[in-house]
């Protein structure tokens, strides 16, 4: 595999990995894209589109497609991992033996590790050690719109400022602006918790509770997200930015959101499994609800909306009961 020092290897040929590879190409890179599904690789190579996850969007010819993960890892200094949170650790373990000595690892994975309650950067440090530069990409982005080249902004967070700047520069082009941040914790918490809140908001809308309820859930959800993020060491300012409020509003209000659609389907009487099959891709908020419940409980952080979402998903709670619990909470100052 031919790669220059500045090219990036993208791991994960789902909708998001494909879209980011397209954006890197648009910004002047010649990225490589790895996927494990044979039908996806065949489509990318022979039709120059991802007919499974991102149909009808052309994949540029300068994106190299491969099913050989080891070769991709060995050929690229910078790796961008785009896989669901429940396989993030296993991908890191597969990558580690083949990494270059100067490797830098970034990811667009959103969510806590359910079994441990760890954020992705904690999983990465535990798996790869603390000497490897790490970064996370997050923000209000739908893969399809990035793939189409519609104007988009997102955040690249890293404690290694050079890596953050390099990655943001590699992605930025006429229709895409990447900002940098040093707050990996805050950016990761925003990306995880907003998915839980989007399921709750979708369910509320599906039950016809109205615009007032939707805005209340988003606004008070932001307060919950911020409380947890600050308790974990994030900066309050981060949650008012793209990867906090921006991503929350996007995911809660647009039907491109898998998590919002999950909530809408549950409100219509469908099961989690039925909706997961209908959506056809991982709905991160379902697993995130369990992780947020675990982490918030351990830290003693009050998250009533996320708690009711957890009960709806895992304990057979009803939406009507959830509304009553939330509305009957004791009167207290908003801030």
Image (spheres, helix red, strand yellow):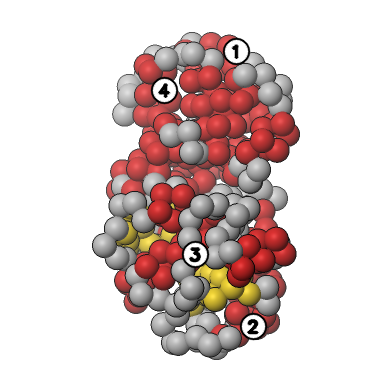
Q: Position of residue 9 (x, y in %)?
A: 53, 75
49, 203: nearer the viewer:
49
Report crowding for label 3: few under 14, some 14 to 19, many 20 or more residues within 10 A (C-alpha).
Answer: many
Numbered tag placed on residue 321 in the rendering:
1
Name the residue located 31 percent from the left edge and 59 percent from the top edge: 176
Position of 110 relative to 257 (above/below)? below
In the picture provided, is 264 more to the left or to the right than 248? right
Q: Position of residue 247 (x, y in %)?
A: 40, 43
Q: Position of residue 265 (x, y in %)?
A: 61, 26
Name the residue located 63 percent from the left edge and 53 percent from the top edge: 52
In the picture provided, is 292 more to the left or to the right than 180? right
Report crowding for label 2: few under 14, some 14 to 19, many 20 or more residues within 10 A (C-alpha).
Answer: some
Comes first in the chain, label 2 or label 1: 2
Comes first in the chain, label 2 or label 4: 2
**Residue at which label 2 appears:** 71
Comes first in the chain, label 4 or label 1: 4
Q: Position of residue 301 (x, y in %)?
A: 50, 36
Numbered tag placed on residue 59 in the rendering:
3
Whether residues under marks 1 and 3 lie with C-beta atoms below 8 angstroms apart, the answer is no
Report crowding for label 1: few under 14, some 14 to 19, many 20 or more residues within 10 A (C-alpha).
Answer: few
Q: Mark 1 to mark 3: distance in Å?
A: 47 Å
Comes first in the chain, label 1 or label 3: 3
Report crowding for label 4: few under 14, some 14 to 19, many 20 or more residues within 10 A (C-alpha).
Answer: many
Numbered tag placed on residue 214 in the rendering:
4
Q: Answer yes or no: is residue 237 visible.
A: yes
Q: Quadrant of the N terminus?
A: bottom right
Q: Mark 2 to mark 4: distance in Å?
A: 47 Å
């Amino acid at each position: 595999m031919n790669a220059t020092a500045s090219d990036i290897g993208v791991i994960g040929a789902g909708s998001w990995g494909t879209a980011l590879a397209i954006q890197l190409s648009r910004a002047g890179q010649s990225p490589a894209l790895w996927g494990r599904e044979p039908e996806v690789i065949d489509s990318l190579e022979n039709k120059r589109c991802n007919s499974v996850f991102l149909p009808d969007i052309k994949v540029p010819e300068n994106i190299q497609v491969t099913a050989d993960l080891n070769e991709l890892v060995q050929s690229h200094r910078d790796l961008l991992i785009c896989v669901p949170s429940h396989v993030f650790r296993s991908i890191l373990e597969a990558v580690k033996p083949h990494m270059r000595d100067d490797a830098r690892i970034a990811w667009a994975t959103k969510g806590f590790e359910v079994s441990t309650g760890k954020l992705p950067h904690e999983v990465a440090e535990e798996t790869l050690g603390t000497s490897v530069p790490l970064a996370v990409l997050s923000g209000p982005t739908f893969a399809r719109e990035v793939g189409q080249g519609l104007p988009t902004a997102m955040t690249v967070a890293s404690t290694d400022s050079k890596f953050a700047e390099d990655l943001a520069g590699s992605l930025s082009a006429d229709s895409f602006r990447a900002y940098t941040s040093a707050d990996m914790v805050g950016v990761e918490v925003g990306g995880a918790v907003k998915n839980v809140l989007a399921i709750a908001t979708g369910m509320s809308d599906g039950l016809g509770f109205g615009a007032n309820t939707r805005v209340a859930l988003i606004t008070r959800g932001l307060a919950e997200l911020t409380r947890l993020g600050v308790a974990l060491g994030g900066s309050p300012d981060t949650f008012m930015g793209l990867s906090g409020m921006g991503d929350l509003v996007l995911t809660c209000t647009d039907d491109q959101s898998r998590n919002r659609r999950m909530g809408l389907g549950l409100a219509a009487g469908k099961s989690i499994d039925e909706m997961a099959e209908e959506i056809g891709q991982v709905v991160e908020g379902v697993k995130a609800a369990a992780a947020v419940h675990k982490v918030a409980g351990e830290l003693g952080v009050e998250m009533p909306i996320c708690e009711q979402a957890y009960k709806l998903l895992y304990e057979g709670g009803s939406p009507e009961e959830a509304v009553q619990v939330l509305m009957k909470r004791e009167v207290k100052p908003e801030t």
